[in-house]
Structure formats: structure tokens, C-alpha cells
Image: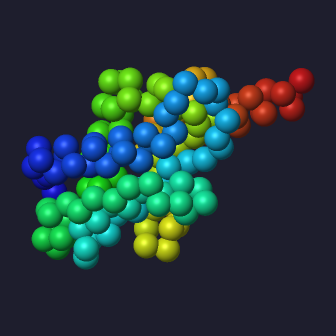
Amino acid sequence: MKLSQASLSLLEKAIKQAVAKYTCGCEQTIVTDIHLQANQNSGELSIFDDEDEYLACVSIEEWMTYDGDDFYENVERILSTLLHNMKNGGDFEKLTILKPYSFVLVDDEKETIAELLLMDDDTLLVNEELLKGLDEELDSFLKELLEK
């Protein structure tokens, strides 16, 4: 699924509108994650906090006309890329949300599909590449430890 520049701009604007509620010069006091709920039938992206408080909503035309089975995989890729670009652009630096917090893609039942972006200064997300070979290393370590 390929989105037009206008649709990407609408998504970015909606995310900025959602996080604007958490922007001020005060200290960080809010504990929440930002939930992004994409709906293929209506084409809407709804954005909520942990208490299901509505933050923003936008309609994406390409989502309404998309008929593939990989809708959420495409939405995850698009939103993850957009959020990382926004983070690199400094859009999330002045939020009053306590770290760590996440931008999470959820389905219609508000079940987590994917963590799109983790905002933290010192936390590392574990992925397959990082864990590759870990079992062998642990087995080797345990064998060596038991032989002593």
C-alpha cells in the first residue's frame, strides 16, 4: 500500500494534534501510551491515550479502497516510519509524558498489534537480530558453569 503525500501529511497532522495535548513548559507528570487505531473499512485512524480518551482522528482515502489481507502490516510500516521521522525531527521532545512511553498500533478491540515507537532515553527494544545466537551462548555458559 502506497500513501499519497497528502495522506502522509494528514497522518502527521493528526499525530501532532494528538500529542499537542501533552505539550507545555511544565514538568513531566503524565503516565500514558498513545494508541493508534486504524480501521480499514472506514479509513479512519483514531488516536487515544491509555484511558481511551480521544485525542485525534483522521480519514485516509487509500485505506478505504485497500482490499489486501496485509492491511495492518502496511499500516504498521507506514506509521512506524512516520513516527521515527517525527522523533528525529524533534516533534516529541517537549511532551509532558513520563518516559518510557510508546506509540502502539491497536486493532478494533484495542488489542495491541505492534509497538510502533518506544520513547525512552536508555531502553533498548529486543528484536530477533539482537537475540540471534542467544540460546547457544546461554547453553555454552551453563555447560561451562556446571563443569567447574
Is residue 62 at least partly visible in the picture?
Answer: yes
Q: Of residues 111 and 124, which is closer to you in this image? A: 111
- Residue located 23% across and 62% down the image: 59
Q: Of residues 37 and 14, which is closer to you in this image? A: 14
- Residue located 13% across and 71% down the image: 65
35 w.r.t. 89: above or below: below
Q: Residue furthest front?
A: 25
Q: Residue furthest right?
A: 148
Figure label count: 0
**Quadrant hosting residue 134:** top right
97 w.r.t. 4: above or below: above
17 w.r.t. 110: above or below: above
- Residue located 25% across and 74% down the image: 42
**Residue 10 position within the rendered picture, expressed as x and y whole percent measured from the top left:** 22, 49
**Residue 109 position within the rendered picture, expressed as x and y whole percent measured from the top left:** 49, 74
Q: Quadrant of the C terminus?
A: top right
Q: Of residues 75 and 16, which is closer to you in this image? A: 16
Give the left or right position of residue 114, taking residue 9 as reference: right
**Residue 32 position within the rendered picture, expressed as x and y whole percent measured from the top left:** 60, 47
Give the left or right position of residue 6, taking residue 107 as reference: left
5 w.r.t. 143: above or below: below
Is residue 128 at least partly visible in the picture?
Answer: no
Q: How is the image coloured?
A: rainbow
**Residue 90 position within the rendered picture, expressed as x and y whole percent measured from the top left:** 38, 23
- Residue located 61% across and 60% down the image: 51
Q: Quadrant of the N terminus?
A: bottom left
